[in-house]
Amino acid sequence: MLTVQFTCSDCAQTIEVNEEMRETILATGCPVCTTDAGEEDFSGDAGEDELDDADDG
Ligand SMILES: [Zn+2]
């Protein structure tokens, strides 16, 4: 299940949401304080392959 993390820019509440919930928040705003939310308030870390080129030796 793909989930993203929503962080409200107003009340700073962090909530883990799925795709459906994400679209709901984009349409209706923060579920806590109803402040308008945008794409930038979501941070998705699923499906992304993080590059780590740290050479420790
Ligand atoms: Zn909020």
Image (cartoon, rainbow, N blue to C red):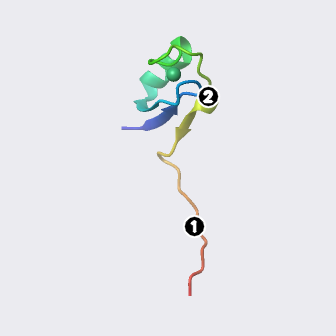
Give percent across and percent down for residue 17: 42, 30
* Mark 2 or 1, nearer chain start: 2
Q: Is residue 49 above or below residue 21?
A: below
Q: Is residue 30 left or right of residue 1?
A: right
The answer to which quarter of the image holds residue 39 is top right
Which residue is at a point 43% across and 22% down the rendered structure image? 20
Q: Which residue is mark 1?
A: 52
Which residue is at a point 63% across and 32% down the rendered structure image? 40
Disc assigned to residue 39: 2
**As drawn, which residue projects farthest toward the front?**
11
Q: Is residue 25 above or below residue 48?
A: above
Q: Amino acid at mark 2?
A: Glu
Which residue is at a point 55% across and 39% down the rendered structure image? 43
Q: Is residue 24 above or below residue 48?
A: above
Give percent across and percent down for residue 32: 44, 18
Q: Amino acid at mark 1?
A: Asp
**As drawn, which residue projects farthest toward the bottom?**
57
Can you say which quadrant of the picture contains the N terminus? top left
* Crowd class of label 2 (few under 14; some 14 to 19; many from 20; radius 10 Å): few
Disc 1 C-beta below 8 A from ligand 1: no
Front one among 38 and 12: 12
Q: How many marks?
A: 2
Front one among 14 and 5: 14
Q: How far apart are the alpha carbons under marks 2 and 1?
A: 26 Å
